[in-house]
Amino acid sequence: MSPLALLITITSVLVVLGFLEHRRHLRHLGKLKIRIHVNGTRGKSSVTRLIAAGLRAGGVRTCAKTTGTLARMILPDGKEYPIFRPAGANVIEQLRIVRTAVQFQAEALVIECMAVQPAYQAISELKMVRGTHGVITNARADHLDVMGPGEEDVALALAATTPKDGKLYTTEPRHLPVFEMAAKDRGSTLVAVGQEEVATVGAVELGGFSYLEHAENVALALKVCADLGVERQTALAGMWAASPDPGVLTAVTLDFFGRRIVFVNAFAANDPESTGRIWRDAAGRFPETQKKIALVNCRADRADRSRQLGEACLSWGLADHYVLIGTGTYIFAKAAIDEGLDPSRITYAEDRRTEEVFETLVELSGTSALIIGLANIGGMGLDVVRFFKNRSVKRPEETSPK
């Protein structure tokens, strides 16, 4: 056989196999009568978990998949397992998740969008998930190097996961025209969960969680569950009992040889708006601490994020020290110094091990300190969180990044 004939034969076989795989995937999708595709800048993992828990409590056999800090598959009994990624994260794994949900005879699949590139977000929805319901938690200035340059561009990218002939839910008030346009284009109905509806999630509802959850997340999840026939209190009971994402915002207290140290894990809040909100809230909750320390976990492959946070950090309130870990720390430092930060407040700890970073933070803490972890949970971030949690003196308070 000539090389050309061999090439034609191989190509033909691959095309046929691809066609057969596509047909099999469509059959799998047809067996899942409810498919909920969750997207947004912040809160995707939390809302995915809340919706799935509410549906389970309502008697709907439900599987869920979160990307979050650690990718997880949640089965109909609520048990969860890590997702095996032999070649790293890839949107193709959504096909495997759909197949697994069918194998567990699920009626519903709640799946977090894992794509960042706008084109891949569209492919994820139109080819892989084909949601009956879409959810966009919010649209904020993050991943601007891919989805930017502006916040409205982020909203346009996220709108790529709008379902065809379904419903799209959101609590994002600033970009409703974008989502209305996308819903109209795909023949779907936009369901905007406004502030009046968010306000119905009060202290009683939020007090049922073993951690601090955001009213917007709960209101959004309750709306989806209600439209699928689950009564409010039943859905809430399921949500209260659900496990939070491993990367939820936590606050732990350490009594370290007479020093009182409060460590707040805000690593998963990556955009300036969310991070600034958490910084101000934490400073208000722990005003008695002597010093405030920003622990910034940088990533060289997230240079745009480091620059944004560096430019915005002074607007949140001045910290006594900025300890920089991870990679590409100079990007954050340069942006912050350009905005007026005194370079003497910066400690570079890029090449230090977790225990050495901890020792550095203790040395800077004085008699008491509030340490807030920022920027990225990946890399050293999760190790630092575990290091502090294992040394805490009381049960952590938890909240999903918003």
Image: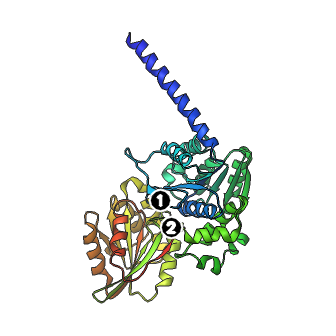
Residue 379 position within the rendered picture, expressed as x and y whole percent measured from the top left: 35, 59
User: Mark 2 highlights which residue?
Assistant: 243
| Towards the viewer: 384 or 290 | 384
Earlier residue among tags 1 and 2: 1
Q: How is the image coloured?
A: rainbow
Nearest the eye: 107 or 299? 107
Q: Is residue 342 left or right of residue 211?
A: left
Whether residue 106 sits left or right of residue 380 in the image: it is right
Q: Is residue 287 left or right of residue 240?
A: left
Residue toward you, 83 or 69: 83
Q: Are marks 1 and 2 in contact (CB under 8 Å)?
A: yes
Query: Foreground residue, 35 or 293?
Result: 35
- The residue that disc 1 covers is 80
Looking at the rendered structure, the kind of residue marked 1 is Glu
Q: From the viewer's perspective, is residue 339 above or below residue 106?
A: below
Position in image of residue 126 (x %, y %): 61, 41
Q: Position of residue 245 (x, y in %)?
A: 48, 64
Locate residue 342, reporting x and y percent: 36, 74
Element class at badge 1: strand
Residue 320, located in which quarter of the rendered image? bottom left
